[in-house]
Image (tube, rainbow, N blue to C red):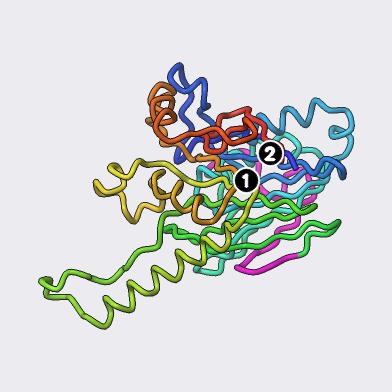
Amino acid sequence: MRIKFWGARGSIPSPGPNTVKYGGNTLCLELRLLDQDRLIIIDAGSGIRELGDSLSRSNNVRDHLSTEIFLTHTHLDHILGLPFFAPIHNPATRLKIYGPVTCEEDPLEDVIGGQLSYRYFPVRQHELGASIEYIDLKEGSYDLGQGVSLITKYLNHPLLALGYRIEYDDKAICTAYDTEPFYNVFCSDPSDPSYDEFLASEGDQAARNENRRMEAFFKDADLLIHDGQYTQAEYDSGKRGWGHSPMEGVIATAGRANVKRLAICHHDPIRTDSQLDELSQLFCKEGIDGDEAIFFAREGQEVEI
């Protein structure tokens, strides 16, 4: 399997002279199953526009494209590129778009179609050239055919989001963004008037259980692509509950789960190349075989496992 990052930024596209190295496009991953020539796309942030342009330059794809797009969730930075994905306007294109069912249980087609209205975009959903099938996902296991299996895991984010574990040919790639560590949502300060000992204990146990389940989801993955938008100090300064992870905790979790390679992504939009370079000196490391064992994902980067 080979992954290419067409976007690694989080929250909002941030192009400019200070984000050239790591890129300013929001998340979009291209996954290739090389022996099948099969294409799987994960997320449709602004990076999917350049992926679509690249695909459209291929004669084979221009005449016919059949692919799958897996959306981790439907926050704008993960779907805003979809209307600008050139193949979606081509009648020769066949798309399956997968994504999580929201808490309101709105059909995925309606959620995606919300931005494809004259209020936001000049082309409406029913005017798109491509043939599109929308498939709702929940937490569970799925057979994608041709020896490819998918395991999904609910993440900790203000909107329902899914982590994906794609297994093929004895290799596993996991994604976990947008997410943060599970924590006790009940008051844990005995001096607080709202403190309830039973709820505090139950909340602590529930958080521990969910964090253990996340580690099991990552277990022995060949590549884990994980949200690391903040440092621990930034996270502790009032960003808990925003749905994004501190990179120090991500690295510790990946180590406990025996992950072989860790790609930290969803870079904060205000984080410059020089700042990411400084952080890489602190947190990134080289593996035994010379590959990057822990690295900050860069737009245009390719990783083969």
Q: Residue furthest front?
A: 288
Residue 166 picture location, percent across and down: 69, 54
* Residue assigned mark 1: 223
Q: For this rendering, which residue is in front, 116 or 248?
A: 248
Residue drawn at (65%, 48%), measured in percent from left and top?
222
Q: Residue furthest bottom?
A: 198
Relative height, residue 214 to residue 120 (above, below) = below
Q: Which residue is rendered at x = 51% and y = 62% of the image?
A: 214
Question: Is residue 85 left or right of 67 when viewed as pictured?
Answer: left
Q: Which residue is mark 2?
A: 3
- Report the magenta residues as a range: 120-142
How many marks overall?
Answer: 2
- In the image, is 94 to the left or to the right of 237? right
Image depth: mark 2 or mark 1 in front: 1
Which quarter shows the C terminus? top right
Q: Position of residue 152 (x, y in %)?
A: 62, 62
Judged from the image, the secondary structure of the residue bearing numbered disc 2 is strand
Amino acid found under the numbered disc labelled 1: Leu
Q: Earlier in the sequence, mark 2 or mark 1?
A: 2
- The location of residue 268, given as percent across then percent down, is 41, 36
In front here: 16 or 85? 16
* Quarter of the image where one finds residue 118: top right
Examine the structure image and report whether residue 91 is included in the region drawn in magenta.
Answer: no
Mark 2 crowdedness (10 Å alpha carbons): few <14, some 14-19, many ≥20: many
Question: Could you say which is closer to the camera, residue 175 or residue 82?
Answer: 175
Q: Position of residue 220 (x, y in %)?
A: 62, 55
Q: Are marks 2 and 1 in contact (CB under 8 Å)?
A: yes
Residue at the (77%, 31%) spot, across then down: 55
Q: Secondary structure at mark 1?
A: strand
